[in-house]
Amino acid sequence: MSAPESKAVSIFDVAKRAGVSHQTVSRVINNAPMVADATRAKVKTAIAELGYRPNRSARALAGGAVRSVTVLTTDTSLYGTAETLRGIEDAARAAGFTILISVLDPDQDYSETDILGRLPQDGAPAIVIAHDETTTAAMRVLQRTQPGATVATGGEHLGVDQDPADWLVSLDDRTVAERATRYLLDMGHAAVHYLAIPSKASRQAGWAAALAQAGVEAPEVVFSGWTVGSAYEAATGLVARPEVTAILCGNDDLAFGVLYAAHRAGRSVPGDLSVIGFDDCPLAAYHVPPLTTVDLDFRGVGRGAFELLRQKLEGGAHPRPTWRSPELIVRETSGPPHHRR
Amino acid sequence: MSAPESKAVSIFDVAKRAGVSHQTVSRVINNAPMVADATRAKVKTAIAELGYRPNRSARALAGGAVRSVTVLTTDTSLYGTAETLRGIEDAARAAGFTILISVLDPDQDYSETDILGRLPQDGAPAIVIAHDETTTAAMRVLQRTQPGATVATGGEHLGVDQDPADWLVSLDDRTVAERATRYLLDMGHAAVHYLAIPSKASRQAGWAAALAQAGVEAPEVVFSGWTVGSAYEAATGLVARPEVTAILCGNDDLAFGVLYAAHRAGRSVPGDLSVIGFDDCPLAAYHVPPLTTVDLDFRGVGRGAFELLRQKLEGGAHPRPTWRSPELIVRETSGPPHHRR
DNA sequence: CCAACGAATGTTAGCGCTCACGGTTCACTC
DNA sequence: GAGTGAACCGTGAGCGCTAACATTCGTTGG
């Protein structure tokens, strides 16, 4: 019934109660040295008794340490993005950072002011999960205006200058794409087709490289959207052709779409058709049949991105972040082609 | 090469340039009335020329409108949560709100201070996506301390007081669970088993109600975690029993786990076993076989939650938010039981 | 023609905090 | 016993903004 609106307690209230100056309180909450243990204790009890909580806006305004990361991304529902976000979250939470997310519209062009305006203040730490044009452009802006407080993850777009100092060229999926393609080729497939997501040129590049090395002419790339449905649509034509015996897919969702299309076309997997995905999403191992795919440690990359950012912010000798490298996981959607005569 | 660090431009810089007072600038950026069109224009060009961007911390500190929502949740990678978040994002973005997310650890107990400390400032708008104990507890704290700036979504835990004014009892999945169960019963299944997620008592309640109404004794509920893998583990025992002919699953992921378990046990779907999920995730329609499930409009609920919050914040006559109601989508994992004699 | 009004603008005082200093105190030295 | 410096603590200013009030000036009506 009574108003709990009783005016938030400030550093001054705590100071009065503890019989010290507000600055001493500030020192205590920031764990600064040069405070006697006795006073520190007094202040701490006062804080507890009054239920004091520091005001972030004030702290930020006064020029204190920021303790927040803004994540810029387009689509939070994609597996890779979501997992990366999870990784950032985990690490940021452990470090006591608040995380803000700002979702950009992939179909929109943003001015420099638009992008900068998404940060809570000038120079605020940011991580860009760059899986498309829009986010890549955002990264370019931030990289230029505040290189010391920005890192990116994902990316690997060809033709973009990606300084490893702030662009976490996260996973070497080019190499693993090459390996996956070669694995298919080595089993005897005459060709390997590629169903592309709207990003990740590196995977496609790896695929192309493996084909070139084997002296096989690269079939035309088929383009799909991000969804299972779009993959199904895009793949119906492909799976109908009996000479197509192996399809490498831009990610697991696309692979599921292809599998469904194959099923509808009456083609058996892996007998008539081998399918390989990317991501190793949780379902991959429990699909019928279990999906051959590439394990990509997005969560680790997210954590790494945060650590890298922190490194930039605070300097010091943080250990260089690491994560699992991509690995082909052979399950039951891939095998040698049918022998037909 | 030159430092772009040249001290962020403030309202005073703009004021000087436009030849007005800083307060007039403030009025312009807040679209306040009582400003002559001519001066407004002058100020606007000054803003553009200087590339001025308002400082959020300062604004918040000075007691201005907040324009941010903090979303509290535990696991952002669950389909329901992720989609709800998407909905909130969409709506918040359209309204020009910044969104902060704060991820709680489901295995941890939080004090009131812990929870309140996650908000950028006292009384800041918040939305809780409550799918478990931890988030429900967080909601209770916020509901008590700042009822005018908090809404929750999800929930539906039995025994929790959920005032519809601030708790968006989002989707009536109790009723649809009942309907799904009856659908299976009506096709001739002697019993319907339930594989439970660690939440959503309402689904289980609907299932139990349908069985009771049909005079069927409710089989023991089998409990699973959130992942496909845990569902697979949990369901292996169940699918091995030939008298089990129908399983209702807490969500689609669990259903996929059950389907895989059934496959491994050599039981055909829907011939030997009917399986129904909840969520209608994108993959459901493209699974082999396509999954019978319940369409749940989480994204709509997320949008709704934001609108409800805004309503509380700003008052006025916003339209009451709406979303699709849950609907059973019959696909190919359900059918009448085998007739055996 | 002047008081009264109100639209348009300016002035002042903080919001809660940190930074950069300036003071104390007190143990030690020479 | 004055001098020194470290350890501790306090004071004042100001971050960029908005709320509340004060002021100016062109209009209006009696």
Image: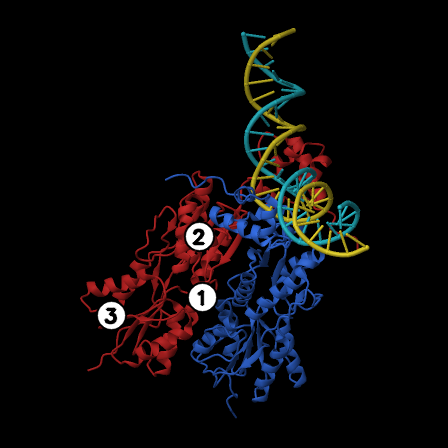
Chain colours: A red, B blue, C cyan, D yellow
Residue C24 location, x and y as percent? Answer: 67, 20
Q: Which residue is mark 1?
A: A282
Q: Which residue is mark 2?
A: A112
Closer-to-camera residue (A337/B295): B295
Screen quadrant of the C terminus of chain A: bottom left
Tell me the SS state at disc 2.
Answer: helix
What amino acid type is highlighted by mark number 2?
Glu
Q: Chain of mark 3?
A: A
Residue B67 location, x and y as percent? Answer: 59, 55
Res A131 seen here: no
Residues flagged by tags 2 and 3 on a common chain: yes
Residue A337 location, x and y as percent? Answer: 26, 75
Residue A221 location, x and y as percent? Answer: 29, 70
What amino acid type is highlighted by mark number 3?
Met
What amino acid type is highlighted by mark number 1?
Pro
Q: Disc 2 vs disc 3: which is toward the camera? A: 2
CA gap between label 3 and label 1 equals 27 Å
Q: Residue at position x 24%, y 62% from top?
A: A209
Q: Which residue is mark 3?
A: A187
B220 sits left or right of B240 in the view: right
The vertical placement of A128 against B244, above or below, is: above
Q: Chain of mark 1?
A: A
- Mark 2 and mark 1 lie on one chain; the one further toward the N terminus is 2
Q: Residue at position x 42%, y 71% from top?
A: A227
Tell me the SS state at disc 1.
Answer: loop
- Mark 2 and mark 3 lie on one chain; the one further toward the N terminus is 2
